[in-house]
Structure formats: C-alpha cells, structure tokens
Image: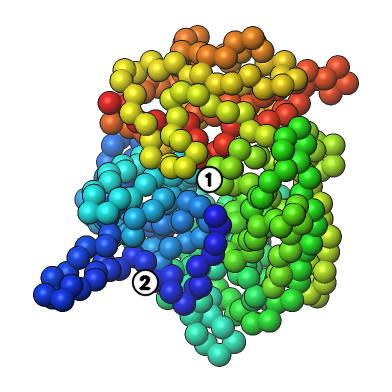
Amino acid sequence: MRKIMNVAILGLVMSVVTLSCKDNTEIPTTGTLKGTVTASSNSQVLGNVRVTVYDANTNAPIGSSVLTLSNGTYQIQLLPGTYYLNLSKQGYNGIPAAGITPVPVTVALETVTVNDFQMQPSSVVNGGSISGKVITSDGNAVAGVLVVASYLTNGYSTVTGADGTYYIYNVPAGTYQVQGFLANYNSPAQSVAVTASTESTGKNITMTLGATGSVTGTVSFLATNNGEVDVTLINPLTKETIPGLVTKTVGGAYLISKIPNGTYIARASYSNDTYVVDPDWILKNGEPMVIITGGNAVAQNFSVTGAVMLVSPTNALTTTIPVEVIGSTPTFTWLAYSSTSDYVIEVSDINGNVIWGGFTKTGLTTTKNLPLILKAQLSIVFNSDGTATTTLKSKSTYRWRIYASKDDTALGWKLISVSEEQQGLFIIQ
C-alpha cells in the first residue's frame, strides 16, 4: 500500500482536477478537506499554521504545504483517498505529537470533510527554528524531502514543499546536524547553530542523484500465517518514513535499493493486513537497524506477528472511514489473544493526544496506565475507572487500540502484540 509518488507530480494532487465531457461539462474529481486550528489554552484562532497533507497508506507527502488564514481556517482540494495532516507552528507542539501515529481521515468525491485541530503551547521554551531550501546539484528545487535536524537522541523534522523550502520549528538552542532524506539522493549533513527565539535562515541542502545503498532480508511470521507485508525504512529519531524507501515482500523476502547514506530502522506492515511488528522480537534483538555508508549493501531480517483483532467500534480493515457511535461512553470489545496476561487500552483524539489508558515512559521505564484489564476481560466501557483526561465530544473523531501484554518473571512484562494502527476509528454522534 505504501507506493511513494514521484516527486515531479506531487504538486498535482492538491490542485482541483477535472475531466471534461463531450459537451464541455466539467466533472468534479475531488473532495474538500477543511477545518479550523485553535490554541488549546484559550481557543484563540491560529493563523500561519503550516499544514502538510500525507497519504495515509504510504506516509508520503502530497503536494505543497498550505498556511491557515488569519481566522485559523484551511481548505484543501484532494482526490478521493485516505490522508493525515501534519501541523506545525513556532511556539506550539506539532500535530501529531512525536512518536504518535496520526489519525487518518477519508476524503470522498464532492464531499466536504471537516477536521478541526487544537494546538498546545510548545514544550520547548524559547525554541528557535531552522529554514532553508533543498535543491539538486544543478539548482532545481526538490519537493517531498524529509529534512531532519539531529543532536544525539533528539530529532526534529519537516518535509519540503513544492518549491523545496522547509521549516523546522521549536528547536532547543544548540548545534544540530541537518540533512535531507529521499530515495536515490544523497546529501551531506551540515552543522547548524540554533539560537533561542531566533530563526536560522538560509540553511540550504544540496541533494546529489545516485544513492546506491541497499538492504535485503526476510520477514518471518511468528504465531501467525505467512503473507505479504510492506517494508519501509524510517528515521530512528523522528520515526518518520523516508520518502521512496518502501517495498513489499515476495515469498517473505524483500529488497530496498537506492538508499542514501544514513542510519535507519526497518519497519513492516503499516497497512491493515492483520500483521504488526512483533514487539517481543524487538525486545530480544533490538530495533532492526540499517546503516548505509558509501552505498553499501546490508542484510536485515526481522519478524511480524498477528495483530490483536478489534470487534467494536471500529472501521473495517478495508477502509479508514470512522464508524458512528451514539453516546459518549462506548463499549470497546476485542478478540482474545493467545498467551496474554492482560491488556492495555489506549484512546486518542484527532490531535494524537492519549486521553485514556496507554503508557507512561520515564527514562528507560515504561509503565502501563490504568485501567487494569485482565486476560479474561474482552470488553471495557470508556472511562469506566474515571481516569480519562477528557470526555468524548460530539462530532469528534477518536481512535482506540489494544496492546497484549505477557508477564515475564525475569523481565517483569513485555508486549506481544497490538491492534492495527489504522483500525479502531470512530466518531461520536
């Protein structure tokens, strides 16, 4: 499902595309995605929020970014399909939050889909920003490049627009290595000093055609039937997909070529195909790293397992259209997962904020948040324990997921599976 679009045609998708009949009547071929962006603290409308659209099936950016107007509104014409939005603005945390899988939205033909967002004040005090342009060696702008500013274990990123420009907001003061990533292109990392509350401008990146790195390997299937899965490379700091570095397995084997120099993590099965990356395999073996230097070829094998299957409320595997739910306290139900000791539920809002359950990470320690769900319990009512941070609001979209946990006397506990990331979508009526 993750077929990356050629950067040369990225800008076409966001245009209003029409077909003509013999009588010169224009037939609409797009739908409308619009909404209003406000501040979570005081509901003030936010202008100049950079809104970037991604294909939810590929994680590839679609066309150029748009800015919200002074009244906080945005409106984009899109071909029918499934998308998610990335929102960024200096002084505010990005949407989705770092490490949070975005909630997809479906755009239908000649239909207006409304997605409003609330942005929280940035957790980075007096952060700076980095801006520049990504060009080829002959001076042409390059769209759809993932630009990452990194320092040790911290990473901040964005994607270039149709004119090759990029903006990375809310970067703590310090010195960063800034680099662009795109299939078949290499770029040298450059050092950028960021000053508090200051924009570091003109930090241009030159991309050189001819990246020759490659990775091959096999994907094994643990406690599930064999099948075809997608494999992609992601940035280890931001967890974002590298545009163009995606493929599908054939007989369990995969090959990704034209990889630029850099360090990546191999990931499998983002699509709703009942497979998820096996958490226990990662626990035992570490993340499946792919390190390319000088265009070398590497091998990396890893495993997937069966997903925890949701029953209700959830969209079907074949669609990401949220199901309608009546009432603000739905009952979540799922199928039993083999070898589970208990389950962890996680409910997120459209902004990617976890509002009930999930996990809390403190350093190297990960704690399961309430409520406690024993292995024999296969359903739970929203906020039945009173720990949700907010109520479910009418006309709003949410996503819930279930994690399967297994007790281990040596390690305490470990995750053995999770539900599909693009299931569990519902909208309150």
Q: Which disc is residue 124 wearing?
A: 1
Quick check: 233 left or right of 128?
right
Quick check: 323 left or right of 201?
left
Residue visible at 34% across and 65% down in the picture: 14
Report x, y in % for residue 24. Answer: 13, 75
Q: In the picture, which quadrant includes the N terminus? A: bottom right
SS at circle 2:
helix
Q: Which disc is residue 320 wearing?
A: none
Quick check: 317 left or right of 372?
left
Report x, y in % for residue 331. Answer: 44, 16
- In the rendered image, the vertical position of residue 216 relative to residue 372, given as above or below: below
Residue visible at 53% across and 14% down in the picture: 379
**In the rendered image, is residue 90 in sight?**
no
Instruction: Name the residue at the right extreme.
Output: 410
Residue visible at 48% across and 19% down in the picture: 332
Q: Which disc is residue 12 wearing?
A: 2
Report x, y in % for residue 395. Answer: 28, 31
Residue visible at 82% across and 20% down in the picture: 408
SS at circle 1:
loop
Question: Is 247 or 137 nearer to us in this picture?
Answer: 247
Q: CA distance from mark 1 to mark 2?
A: 35 Å
Quick check: 85 left or right of 409?
left
The image quadrant that residue 42 belongs to is top left
Instruction: Name the residue at the bottom extreme.
Output: 138
| Crowd around label 2: few <14 · some 14–19 · many ≥20 (10 Å) | some
Q: Amino acid at mark 2?
A: Leu
Q: Are marks 1 and 2 in contact (CB under 8 Å)?
A: no
Q: In the picture, which quadrant includes the C terminus? A: top left
